C-alpha cells in the first residue's frame, strides 16, 4: 500500500524539540493550509485545515533552528492516525503527518518579519529525514562593476539571495 501526503502552508507554532533517551531528536509543530473556492451560490469561500507535524532526527533539529510560527514550508511524509483515551474516558483520535522531507519556502525578508532566523544561503532546505545535513554552498561571485560599464549594460543592485529560484 502507498501512504504519502504533501502539504504546503504556514506553521501555526514554533517547533518544539525533545530528545529520546538514545539522543534522537523529535520535533512537533502544526501547519495551516487553505483552499479557496466558490460555493454553489457563487460566493468566495476559504477552507482552512490544521494538521500536526512530527519531525525526526536531524530534520527536527534543522526545523527547530530555522523555522518559527508563520514560516512557509512544504512537507511530505506519511499520514498517521493517533488514538488515545481522554481523562474523561472518551476515546479520541486525530490525523497527523510524520515528515520525511522538508523544504523551507519564502524569502529572507519574510524571515525578518517573524519567520525563521539566520536561514542558509539559497533559503531552502530539502532533505530526507534519515540523511545528514550538508552546509549550503557559497554563492557565486558577482560580476565586477567595471565589466558591466564596459558593455553598456546598466548595473542592477540585486542580491543573489533575493532571487526566488
Image: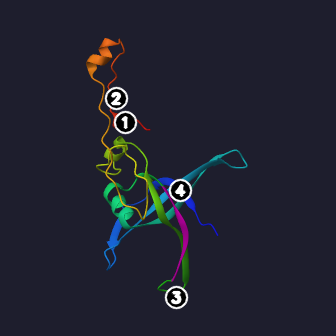
State if disc 1 and disc 2 touch (CB < 8 Å).
yes
Q: Does the magenta stretch include residue 77?
A: yes
Q: In the rendered view, how is the structure colored?
A: rainbow
- Label 4 secondary element: strand
Is 147 situated above or below 104? above
Q: Which mark is residue 7?
A: 4
**Front one among 133 and 47:** 133
Report which quarter residue 16 is drawn in.
Answer: bottom left
Q: Residue 162 carries which label?
A: 1
Residue at x-position 54% and y-position 85%: 90
> Few, some or many C-alpha atoms within 10 Å of disc 3 (few <14, some 14-19, many ≥20)?
few
Measured Cα–Cα span from mark 3 to mark 1? 53 Å
Measured Cα–Cα span from mark 4 to mark 1? 24 Å
**Bounds of the magenta segment:** 75-84
> Few, some or many C-alpha atoms within 10 Å of disc 2 (few <14, some 14-19, many ≥20)?
few
State if disc 1 and disc 3 touch (CB < 8 Å).
no
Residue that carries the numbered disc 3 in the rendered image: 89
First in residue order: circle 3 vs circle 1: 3
Where residue 122 appears, as percent x and y from the top left, is 37, 43
State if disc 1 and disc 4 touch (CB < 8 Å).
no
Residue that carries the numbered disc 2 in the rendered image: 158
In what quadrant of the picture does the N terminus appear?
bottom right
State if disc 3 and disc 4 touch (CB < 8 Å).
no
In what quadrant of the picture does the C terminus appear?
top left
Measured Cα–Cα span from mark 4 to mark 3? 33 Å
**Front one among 30 and 80:** 80
Numbered disc in front, either 4 or 3: 4
Amino acid at each position: 500500500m502507498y501512504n504519502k501526503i504533501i502539504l504546503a502552508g504556514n506553521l501555526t507554532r514554533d517547533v518544539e524539540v525533545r530528545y529520546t533517551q538514545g539522543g534522537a531528536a523529535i520535533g512537533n509543530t502544526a501547519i495551516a493550509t487553505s483552499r479557496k473556492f466558490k460555493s454553489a451560490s457563487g460566493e468566495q469561500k476559504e477552507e482552512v485545515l490544521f494538521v500536526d507535524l512530527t519531525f525526526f532526527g536531524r530534520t527536527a533539529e534543522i526545523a527547530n533552528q530555522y523555522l518559527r510560527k508563520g514560516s512557509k514550508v512544504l512537507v511530505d511524509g506519511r499520514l498517521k492516525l493517533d488514538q488515545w483515551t481522554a481523562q474523561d474516558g472518551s476515546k479520541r483520535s486525530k490525523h497527523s503527518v510524520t515528515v520525511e522531507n522538508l523544504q523551507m519556502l519564502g524569502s529572507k525578508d519574510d524571515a525578518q518579519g517573524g519567520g525563521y532566523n539566520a536561514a542558509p544561503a539559497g533559503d531552502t532546505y530539502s532533505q530526507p529525514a534519515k540523511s545528514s545535513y550538508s552546509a549550503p554552498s557559497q554563492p557565486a561571485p558577482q560580476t565586477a562593476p567595471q565589466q558591466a560599464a564596459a558593455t553598456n549594460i546598466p548595473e542592477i543592485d540585486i542580491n543573489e539571495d533575493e532571487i526566488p529560484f
